[in-house]
Image (tube, helix red, strand yellow):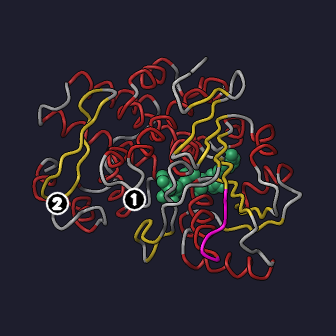
Amino acid sequence: MRYFCSPIQLVTNMDYSIEIKGRSEVVVGSAGDHLPRLLPDKRVVVVSDTNIDRHYHSLVNRYDHVLIGLGEASKTLVTADAIYKKFISMGVDRSTFVLAIGGGIVTDVAGFVASTYMRGLEFGFISTSLLGQVDASVGGKNGVNVDGYKNMVGTFTQPRFVICDAGMLRTLPERELRTGMAEIIKAGIIADGELFSILERTPLAELAKNPEMLGEVVYRAVKVKADIVERDERETGDRRKLNLGHTLAHAIEKSSSKMNHGEAVAVGLALISEAAMHRGILSAADRERICGLLRRTGFDLTPPVAMRVLLKAVAKDKKSEGDMLHVVFPEAVGSCRVERMPLDEFSAMFV
Ligand SMILES: NC(=O)c1ccc[n+]([C@@H]2O[C@H](COP(=O)([O-])OP(=O)(O)OC[C@H]3O[C@@H](n4cnc5c(N)ncnc54)[C@H](O)[C@@H]3O)[C@@H](O)[C@H]2O)c1
């Protein structure tokens, strides 16, 4: 597998490196192989969670550690404050490098703390969940939730590097693996029809057993995100496309605890595909391909709460600007467009 288009380089026969904004290197390959090359020659402090520490402590055991709790409940200013205090007691200063190892919760919190502690420390990620590898760790957004509102406080700061090691996904629970697949399917719909076709040909169970193929799928999804972030780092234009399916997904996550992020994204993708078909934007065949792949990947596409409850939550979501929304519609497998529309028009598509 060889990809020559700049700024991507092949690191070894199976590994890929993608540069974002000339400041961040995303490597898809073995953490053990690449970490020594990527870590700067300075003090390193590791931020992780208790799960990851149990599985991967030996990879980073020579460094001081700060561990955080599990789940969305840990992605708060309280956790950030606890890390700041721990950093102070450990004598962490501007010359320290923060290495976060974990899923999206760890990288969001650690990226935020590193970007703000003493006005900013250098940091890098070993991304260990599939969702983290293809989405959360890539692109420079970090942050914490406030008062139940997702990602209300944060920064845009690129990590110096992100390592996505498909081999580490072996220890990831199956439900978490599926969660990441929703974002990979989304990436295929947005801009990579071939990635979508690979997923159609390869059932999740087969992909999970094949780290080389999983690595290629991760690489292709990262490339979709990296290309968009390269053009629009601060989400004033094209980056909005990455929100495909997310307006309703965020509403689902806010209104029900039954579904995790990827499961909610899968429902959001199905609903927006249906709406796009009814508006004459997406063909019935492509809508069926999208919903068929989501179903075969194991997603339940029925919203867990009534549509009117979801639409109420959309109205409160931070992405609504006044009563206008930026809505991302799939146009085909591999292409999408953003339309600005009043909230009422958006709601009318689903009732
Ligand atoms: N910053 C962004 O651009 C961005 C984008 C998308 C999502 N996110 C955020 O990402 C978060 C979700 O990330 P997530 O799904 O990775 O959740 P997570 O970090 O909670 O990880 C899921 C679970 O899997 C465990 N885990 C992770 N890697 C493992 C491994 N290799 N082996 C065994 N267990 C492992 C974790 O300990 C955790 O219990 C959300 O808060 C979401 O808002 C951020």
Is 120 magenta? The answer is: yes
For marks 2 and 1, give the one nearer the viewer: 2
Can you say which quadrant of the picture contains the N terminus?
Answer: top right
The question of residue 90 being in magenta is answered with no
For residue 240, side relative to residue 208 (left or right): left
Of residue 330 and residue 69, the one placed in the foreground of this image is: 330
What residue do we see at 83% from left, 66% from top?
Answer: 64
Q: Which residue is mark 1?
A: 253
286 or 15, which lies in front? 15
- Residue displayed at 71% across by 21% down: 13
> Badge 1: few (under 14), some or many (20 or more) residues near its Cα, within 10 Å?
many
Whether 339 is drawn above or below 154: the answer is: above
Q: Is 117 drawn above or below residue 179 in the view shown?
A: below
Write down the residue under mark 2.
Answer: 324
Label whose residue precedes the other's in the sequence (2 or 1): 1
Element assignment for label 2: strand
